[in-house]
Image (cartoon, rainbow, N blue to C red):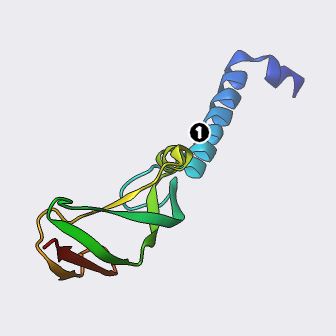
Amino acid sequence: MDQWLRNTNVVRVIALVIGILLWAVVRMDGGTISSTTTSGMKEEKIWNVAVTPKYDTDHFFVEQIDPAQVTVTISGRDSTVKKVMAAANYSVELDLTNVGKGEYLSAGYAGRVSLRYYR
């Protein structure tokens, strides 16, 4: 055994085998991030975010927004979600600029909004 380790070719082969084994372990453990895998993905929920209406304040007023607070779900790469969660300044804006008076159910917003006209 001592003579084998003194032979440079044997040491090279052993180093090559160890290198291939290390590469295989790292490759299997890390994997690749693609659109079909969830490796490295994260989902966070932000509770009680206030809904702020955006509308023509000269002619209309909002009578009711129900619910007034919503839960926002953020999903994406782990690093991106961490950056967003660190901001701690969240808002939801409900755009009512292109609607007239009436009661609306907005797409993507599971609630009711009553918009009245000033007389």
Residue 24 shown left or right of residue 97 in the figure: right
Which residue is disc 1 drawn over?
Answer: 23
Can you give x and y, in whole percent of width and height, for residue 17 in the image? Answer: 65, 35
Can you give x and y, in whole percent of width and height, for residue 25 in the image? Answer: 63, 46
Can you give x and y, in whole percent of width and height, for residue 72 in the image? Answer: 45, 65
Residue 117 drawn above or below residue 78: below
Give the residue displayed 65% in from the left and 39% down from the top.
Answer: 22
Give the residue displayed 45% in from the left and 71% down from the top.
Answer: 70
Can you give x and y, in whole percent of width and height, for residue 55 in the image? Answer: 21, 61
Closer to us: 93 or 55:
55
Residue 67 drawn above or below residue 20: below
Residue found at the far front of this picture = 119
Residue 67 shown left or right of residue 30 in the figure: left
Residue 86 drawn above or below residue 109: above
Q: Quadrant of the N terminus?
A: top right
Residue 77 shown left or right of residue 112 in the figure: right
> Amino acid under label 1?
Trp
Per the image, label 1 sits on a secondary structure element best described as helix
On the image, which quarter does residue 116 sit in? Answer: bottom left
Mark 1 Cα within 10 Å, few/some/many (few <14, many 20+)?
Answer: few
Closer to us: 22 or 108:
108
